[in-house]
């Protein structure tokens, strides 16, 4: 199919320019984002804003005489959302030189570097340390088969992912493109159609927590089956995911399910090629209500018609259209209605280099 499957946001591949053992690659995307949750009179943000991202990826490698390969990766990224350019990094004291007063200035950078990931590999075995990929993040069949791995030009908050529930989005280990990452360690083994992945990370501090993740996937012919599990010391972070995907050439379909520490969510997905350059994708997910006992224990509340709830219970759906412009560029557009009735529509251009 013309679609490209991105199993993980950490592994988005692009064309690259090689210079000895250093490769530079990346992508740019920009477009318009309509979000009916915004209101200039309420939160000061227009309903229609510009969304954009420019990413440069640097990959360095070396290989010993015995065939053991060492590599490292880091990224530089500039981003704009809701017409706000750059990344907030804190405040500096204003003219009075005193923090915490009215003239303090928010510091924003147009671009930031992320944390590095280091790796060593031999034949089908790889070990990474630092800003790791993460076993759950690397599971096939959880992200959409689009260039942004979600709906529209920037993913539209990724309600399409069965691991995102309640107000607990992306609460698993994953490669961070704009931050330092989890500073963990992982082992990945691939042979034939089989991939096994084990990851571990720890967070230091007054309340330390550990995460352990495991993922297994197998591809045979047009089918890919996968399962992943994360166990965490932190509240509400245990999760188990399964997926089955079929790629029939012009058509593709998959189903996915996750138990997110007591909140179930399932998704059905389908896409088809239209003509020689277009692809159309649709999805539907449904999120179970959180238990009253968990809410009493301090968990966020996703239930409908409950005061103070984020109202993420129920169904989300979306449609995405992609047109290949050639030369690594494409037009991307998508509409998404979230389970809390938030509507977004995005359209723009994505190009890789």
Image: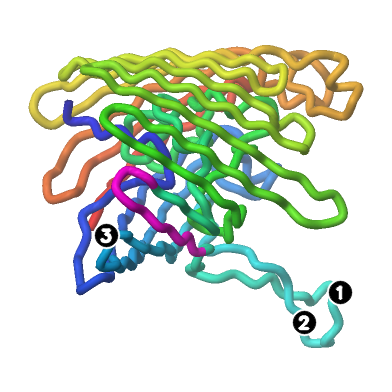
Res. 67 mark: 3
Name the main secondary structure of what is drawn in magenta: strand
- Estimate the spatial distance between the alpha carbons at disc 3 and disc 1, rounded to whole Å: 58 Å
The residue furthest left is 276
Q: Is residue 272 magenta?
A: no
Q: Are marks 1 and 2 in contact (CB under 8 Å)?
A: yes
Q: Residues within 10 Å of mark 2 (few under 14, many from 20)?
A: some
Q: Residue at x 49, y 64 (%)?
A: 116
Measured along the vertical axis of the image, is residue 312 above or below residue 195? above
Element carrying mark 1: loop
Q: Is residue 120 magenta?
A: yes
- Estimate the spatial distance between the alpha carbons at disc 2 and disc 3, rounded to whole Å: 55 Å
User: Earlier along the polypeptide chain: callout 3 or callout 1?
Assistant: 3
Q: State left or right for residue 66 relative to residue 84.
A: left
Magenta residues, as a range? Answer: 116-125
Return the x and y of residue 254 as percentages of the image width and height: 37, 15
Res. 94 mark: 2
């Amino acid at each position: 199919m013309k679609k490209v499957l991105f199993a993980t946001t950490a592994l988005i591949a692009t064309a690259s320019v090689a210079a000895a053992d250093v490769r530079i690659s990346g992508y740019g995307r920009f477009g318009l984002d309509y979000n009916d949750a915004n209101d200039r009179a309420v939160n000061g943000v227009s309903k229609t804003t510009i969304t954009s991202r420019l990413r440069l990826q640097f990959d360095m490698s070396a290989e010993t005489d015995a065939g053991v390969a060492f590599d490292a990766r880091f990224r530089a990224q500039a981003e704009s959302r809701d017409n706000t350019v750059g990344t907030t990094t804190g405040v500096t004291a204003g003219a009075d030189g005193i923090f915490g007063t009215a003239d303090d200035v928010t510091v924003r950078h147009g671009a930031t570097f992320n944390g590095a990931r280091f790796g060593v590999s031999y034949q089908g075995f790889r070990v990474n340390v630092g800003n790791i990929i993460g076993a759950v993040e690397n599971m096939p069949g959880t992200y959409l088969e689009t260039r942004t791995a979600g709906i529209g030009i920037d993913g539209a908050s990724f309600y399409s992912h069965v691991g995102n529930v309640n107000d607990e989005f992306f609460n698993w280990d994953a490669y961070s493109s704009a931050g330092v990452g989890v500073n963990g360690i992982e082992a990945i083994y691939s042979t034939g159609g089989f991939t096994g992945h084990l990851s571990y990370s720890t967070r230091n501090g007054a309340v330390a927590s550990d995460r352990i993740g495991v993922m297994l996937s197998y591809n045979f012919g047009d089918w890919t089956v996968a399962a992943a599990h994360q166990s965490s010391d932190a509240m509400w972070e245990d999760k188990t995911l399964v997926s089955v995907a079929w790629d029939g050439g012009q058509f593709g379909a998959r189903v996915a399910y996750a138990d997110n520490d007591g909140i179930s969510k399932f998704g059905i997905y389908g896409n088809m090629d239209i003509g020689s350059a277009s692809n159309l994708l649709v999805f539907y997910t449904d999120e179970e209500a959180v238990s009253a006992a968990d809410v009493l224990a301090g968990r966020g509340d996703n239930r409908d018609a409950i005061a103070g709830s984020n109202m993420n219970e129920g169904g989300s759906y979306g449609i995405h259209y992609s047109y290949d412009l050639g030369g690594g560029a494409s037009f991307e557009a998508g509409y998404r209605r979230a389970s809390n009735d938030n509507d977004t529509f995005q359209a723009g251009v994505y190009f890789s280099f």
